[in-house]
Amino acid sequence: MPNWLQQIDIGLFRWINQSWSNPFFDKLFEFLSGNAVFYPLLACTAIFLWIKGGRRGRIFVCITFLSFLLSELIVGALKDWIARPRPFMVLEDAICRIGKGGSGSMPSSHTSTWFVGVAVTWIYWKSCRWWMPILASGVALSRIYNGVHYPSDIIVGAMIGIICGLTIAYGGEFVWSNLLSKYFPSLTSKIPSLLRPEEEPVSSASLPKQKADIDRQFLIGGYLLIVFMLIFRWWYLWQGKIELSEDEAYQWVWSKYLALSYFSKPLMIALSHWTGTHLWGDNMFGVRFLTPVFSSITSLLLLRFLSREANPKIAFFTVLAGMLAPLLAVGSLLMTVDPLAVMFWTAALVCGWKAVKEDSFSSWIWMGIWMGFGFLSKYSTPLLLFSWIFFFILCKPARIQLRKPGIYLSFGISLIFSIPVLIWNYQNEWISFIHVVDHGQLDKTWHFTLRYFGDFTGSEFGLLNPIFFIMILWASFAFWKKRNMLTLYLFSFGGPIFAAYWLYTLHSRVYPNWIAPAVISLFALAGIFWGEKQKTKPVLVRRLYISGVIIGLLMIIPLHDTNLITKVSGWSLPAKIDPLRRVRAWSELGETVEKVRKEMEAKTKEPFFIIGDHYGITGQLSFEIPEARQSLNPPIKPLVYYMHSTYPENQFYFWPSYREARIGENAIFVKETDQPQNNPPERILNDFERVENLGFYEITYRGRVFRTVQLFACYKAKPVS
């Protein structure tokens, strides 16, 4: 910005921020910037328009929502690119009357959001044309008055909001009338124009009535939906709105030490990290690049399977429902073992059904291959054996396969894939199997408890989308009245596993993601059941499904960026209940630790390496500190280590210890803790000649404390005795 224009901008800011100051404006503009009433009122308005606003109201809600998303994407990218400090950060005389935001100043997202509303309401509701711009302008001025934005920020924000609203409204009309009407006539015929919702639908006599045409439209729609979500997820990951989770960072380190298997997981997760980072580099996008691919393949398999066995309409809406389940949505972004396991489980499910239905020998072979890859992804894949047992018990006609070689060959092939895991565990005293027993507390004496039952049930109720969870349970009990081989097959591959984990909560804790592979078959079962139910009770099915879509969007959108809650309501989630806490503030931790390390090196004139007290922190520091990341290429002498141990606690045990590679050197020990600690763990005291407490540090994200750590300076590492 030219200096003269910047001076005008600052002058206008000071005039509004300071000269307008009075008690009435203090209250008014604080309310306009954010209040407890706005979010509930907005939700109620949207619901009212959807239910009572007719066709115009529903179109208005959709256009406004899409326009808001577009403006948020543009504003978020510009904030990061321009990185303009907020006024209270650089102007000493600026009066900040509300919370201090941590994002960039240019442009104003509050303003862009409100002017999206101005643009769209101007088109659809003439009665709002006089007061909506006044209200939006009041919100924009409140951002200046409260000291969090410059006048130029709100001008650019308003322009972005108006452009986004007009683009989605008029661009949507063009796409709807000229493109979708050509390929999806049965959809667009009901609403000929988005800008003129009052137009009468096209006469049904002029529409294609053949079932094949409608099926083709839903199938194409499913393909487009999958491609769109793949591109969106790549774009989202490219933006870097979330950082790596502890497991992702930890398993990224594994990819630097490729092996036949690992302490707690088989080898596929490390290979996936290795492939993505070799394509895109050691960055967050590289680590997660393949996750949306795995998710898209899973959706594609489900779409084609249900299109063939039920119909494309059921397939389309089932795939969409899966995308609106938080458990599967999160699994489409984070690079953990679950996306791999779900993909291979689904592939085995599809091939197994084809093998049974068509008596296909080649399909048995492919099922064995996918089961094998599934085992190399997650140790729970052998549960497929129990699914087959349940299926043969429930479905008598399918038992003919037990007298044929296909299924035995399939399981034999899958066993071949276990050889790398067996070799590695044989070389390492079967540590993975010991870990699985310990993790599942399989060696624990059975004592009946309800302690974990409610936690697991509540978690699945939310993570599978409350409405869809109820629909799945309903279908799992009600389908028995009209069961056939297909529905029994789908139930067998999900229901018994879900029930077994449910019962196991009476023994010990079960983590919500453990049932992830079984979820796809349950969604498919529910899709078929409710697709048939739609013929007799269309109103019930439509209301349930629409409710699930709305609740899913309300859950998943904030999960992608919980900062949206602050933007909409003016209230920030406490760090401890922020669902994105596990993927935020790690870069800040890395910066803090690296700053202290450099200060200690400057003070002592000696190098320092880093030690983490947990495998997750060790992985995070290895990834977030550039020098540490580079030290793993190749991992001859890493900068970051886990605490030295005489027994396997995690994968770091199997790699060189600092008591072997860093003898006589100094370290910074990092311990995550809620309260200040005077001393590090006993083993750190034993590993070094002297230890010094460097203090308690709060790691913040946008003004909120996300984690706290204690740092210690450790001098002269002792050799292994």
Image: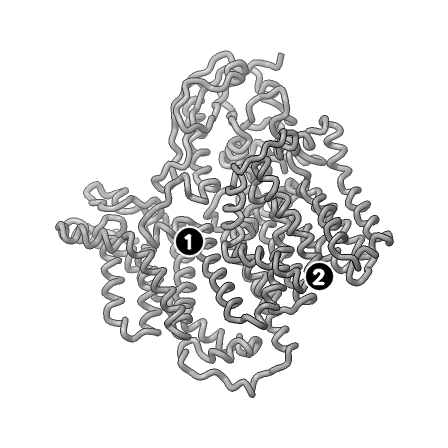
Q: Is residue 227 visible?
A: no
Judge depth for marks 2 and 1 and give the one in front.
Answer: 2
Q: Mark 1 highlights which residue?
A: 77
- The residue drawn where x is 43% and y is 24% is 711
The image position of residue 159, as x and y in percent, is 32, 63
Asked if 614 appears above or below 122 in the picture, the reply is above
Question: In the image, what residue type sits under mark 1?
Answer: Ala
User: How many numbered marks are there?
Assistant: 2
Question: In the image, what residue type sits under mark 2?
Answer: Leu
Res 163 quadrant in image: bottom left
The image position of residue 151, as x and y in percent, is 25, 55
Q: Mark 2 highlights which residue?
A: 486
Q: Is residue 416 visible?
A: yes
The image position of residue 484, as x and y in percent, is 71, 63
Q: Secondary structure at mark 1?
A: helix
User: Is 230 on the left or on the right of 69, as rendered?
Assistant: right
Sequence-earlier tag: 2 or 1: 1
The image's mark for residue 118 is none
* Crowding at mark 1 (Cα within 10 Å: few <14, some 14-19, many 20+): some
Q: Secondary structure at mark 2?
A: helix
